[in-house]
Amino acid sequence: MTVLVTGAAGFIGSHVAEALLKRGETVIGVDNLNDYYDVRLKEARLERLKARPGFTFKRLDFADREAMLSLAGIDILCIVHLGAQPGVRYSLVNPYAYVTSNLMGQVVVLELARALKNLRSVVYASSSSVYGGNTKLPFAVGDAVETPQSLYAATKRADELIAHTYAHLYGLHLTGLRFFTVYGPWGRPDMAPMLFTRAMLKGEPIRVFNKGEMWRDFTYVDDIVAGVLAAMDKPPTVKPPHKVYNLGNHKSEKLTDFIGALESALGVKAEMRFEPMQPGDVISTYADIEETRHDLDFEPSTPISVGVPKFVAWYRDFYGM
């Protein structure tokens, strides 16, 4: 089976592509290798994929209509759309990147899906950020999501609505996945685990927002990959055929406890510099995964006591620290 994976050089995309290759699928990876963060990390992820049989890489922008529709002649059976402009804080700096990538990109991918005659399913990345200002915990898929706290969150909610429309109009089988604070080997350098680890190893202070009163549903990347593949293999049968699920660890950890796990794994004490809440951020995330368990047999199995040491071991090996 041929699977198209967008964002194949990204954190989650590279892990998903690798898992698909391991189980014998043919994977076409798409990525534009933009410089939002260190391109060398993206290239290193790609080299691992290129070393496996069955992988083809196409350097193109998934928001480019002509480039993406040129793939319509390939017998692609599934699309896993993980490419996006990520980051809550960067959306305050460069909002246009989010409109192009996350909105136009979603439409272009779904237009490609319409053009593929034998397509079975599309899985796309949403985000826990869509819950925005909600205070009810844990976050359930049926909760109201009308109070986004950042443009990034707003684009991800818009992606869900666009997908619902395409399912309704064209019968495409679409599944949206709301990821909760994904971490692990090959992670993004703009996210807290990488930022904290780098600073701690250099003896520099780490910035801890809201004076440490922050909670996150930290989810190890292998658990996320299992959820993505399950969603791909079990497209929705409802009408219209579109469903949204939470992919989280179903455990909200205090940020300072996560830092404590890093301290134990690194053997280094963190110097914490407490700062106010940042614009666009939220205090807590916590995933209700009952529906995901029921429909996709999703069962996360990696607590931070296991996942953090694995991440640290990769970090020390990759960066030689």
Image: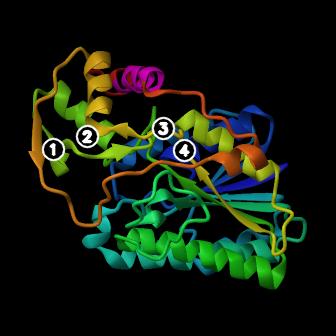
User: Which-is-in-front pick, marks 2 and 4?
Assistant: 4
**Label 4 environment density (alpha carbons within 10 Å; few <14, some 14–19, many ≥20):** many
Q: Amino acid at mark 2?
A: Leu
Q: CA distance from mark 1 to mark 4?
A: 24 Å
Label located before the other in sequence (3 or 2): 2
Dot 3 and dot 2 residues touching (CB under 8 Å): no
Q: Tell me the CA gap for discs 3 and 4.
A: 8 Å
Q: Please indicate whether residue 275 sits to the left or right of residue 34 in the image.
A: left
Q: Earlier in the sequence, mark 1 or mark 4?
A: 1
Residue labelled with disc 3:
251
Disc 3 versus disc 1: distance between alpha carbons?
23 Å
299 left or right of 281 in image? right
**Mark 4 sits on what residue?**
248
State the CA–CA distance, disc 2 to disc 1.
Answer: 9 Å
Task: Give the labeled residue for mark 1.
Answer: 207
Query: Looking at this rendering, what residue extends furthest in the top direction?
Result: 267
The answer to whether residue 159 is above or below residue 15 is below
Q: Are marks 2 and 1 in contact (CB under 8 Å)?
A: yes
Task: Inspect the image, locate mark 1, and give the three-letter code of the amino acid beneath it.
Answer: Arg
Q: Position of residue 307 (x, y in %)?
A: 46, 26
* Residue 226 in which image quadrant: top right
Q: Callout 2: few (<14), some (14-19), or many (20+) C-alpha neighbours within 10 Å?
A: some
